[in-house]
Amino acid sequence: MRAMKAIKRFVSAGICAAMVLGLAGCSSNGGTAFTGGKRIVRISHAQSETHPEHIGLLAFKEYIEENLGDQYEVQIYPNELLGAAQKAIELTQTGAIDFVVAGTANLETFADVYEIFSMPYLFTSEEAYHATMEDTDYMDQIYASTDDAGFRVLTWYNAGTRNVYATSKIETPEDLKGLKIRVQQSPASVSMIEAFGAAASPMSFGEVYTAIQQGVIDGAENNELALTNNKHGEVAKYYTYTLHQMVPDMLIGNLKFLNGLSDEELKIFQEAARISREVEMEAWDDQVEEAKNIAKNEMGVEFIDVDIDVFKAKVEPLHEQMLSENEDIRDIYEHIQEINAVYAEEGGN
Ligand code: GCU
């Protein structure tokens, strides 16, 4: 407890010092900072300032400040400035910061229902993925699962479909043998890469570029924006469409902060979150196409389409295995199967 307080003091002093670089006045009351009488709302994320999530968060900031600008100033910290996802979630948990954007893989240690999104080939179409995430009544129950941990998801952001990329060409699971592939710090993702036939190397996102460059790993798995926004296309020239996961990113808020808002304020924060999601998703669609072009034409990345059934066959047993090991994912698994079926029919499959 004492250690936690010390960390909190340290972090809040650090953040304050960082803010002082650009701001005149900065006072702090516990983990809560004020500037010119306004409560500073701090948001951390891992992406660059051109990434769709940053653009979405700018819309969040704009809406809050338009509606509650006399009380709140929203500050966005990109590029893991306040720490990698796990660390930033812990800061949000203690209230040292108020919001963080992080992928669900990072939430698995707080609520094991989030393991569901690491299950390979869970969604059978992008439409089913989006419909699941937009089913807010259902998802609100999932979002409440981290209340005990002191934080709650406000909305989701699209982070596309994850694929494998490496310094050598991968066309079949055979090509993955003997390779070290970075995965997120999630046991299900480790099992998935091992089932594909490679060795899994869990590490935080910010470490991936250097690890590939230095040959510590042979590749990683992520959406196309990792090639351009995070420059991984400079060091890994083969991007294979394994289409193995659709993992959302989440906007997560400190629960005490959210519970301390008046009903009217909370509505404004929720609406800001909804708007930020819309803006993010639009920017996402624009940027994915652009990222592919840049990676291909300017970075020399080769995009490879493969027969995904052979990859799927390798990891399919993981569905039963994960379900038998974690009862908490069964309900959402079945819920998603129903949604998959609706879109399979609509798609004429
Ligand atoms: C994507 C995703 C992040 C995630 C990262 C990773 O960029 O948007 O939330 O942390 O992948 O692989 O770690």
Image: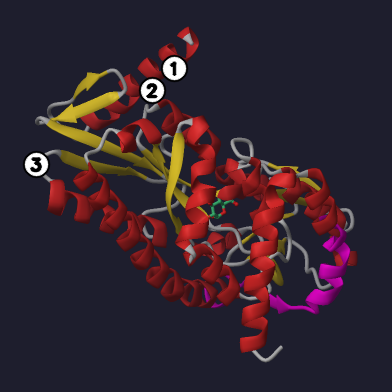
Q: Residues within 10 Å of mark 3 (few under 14, many from 20)?
A: few
User: Which residue matches tag 1?
Assistant: 7
The residue lying at 12 percent from left, 45 percent from top is 69
Q: Which x, y percent locates residue 81?
A: 41, 38
Q: Is residue 217 visible?
A: no
Type of amino acid at the residue the image marks with label 3: Asp
Q: Secondary structure at mark 2?
A: helix
- Residue 70 numbered tag: 3
- Residue 159 as seen in the image, left or right of residue 69: right
- Mark 1 residue type: Ile
Which of marks 2 and 3 precedes in the sequence?
2
Residue 328: horizontal and vertical position, in percent?
A: 69, 46
Residue 53 vs 125, above or below: the answer is above
Residue 243 in the figure: left or right of residue 250: right
**Three-letter residue code for mark 2:** Val
Question: Could you say which quadrant of the image residue 345 lies in?
Answer: bottom right
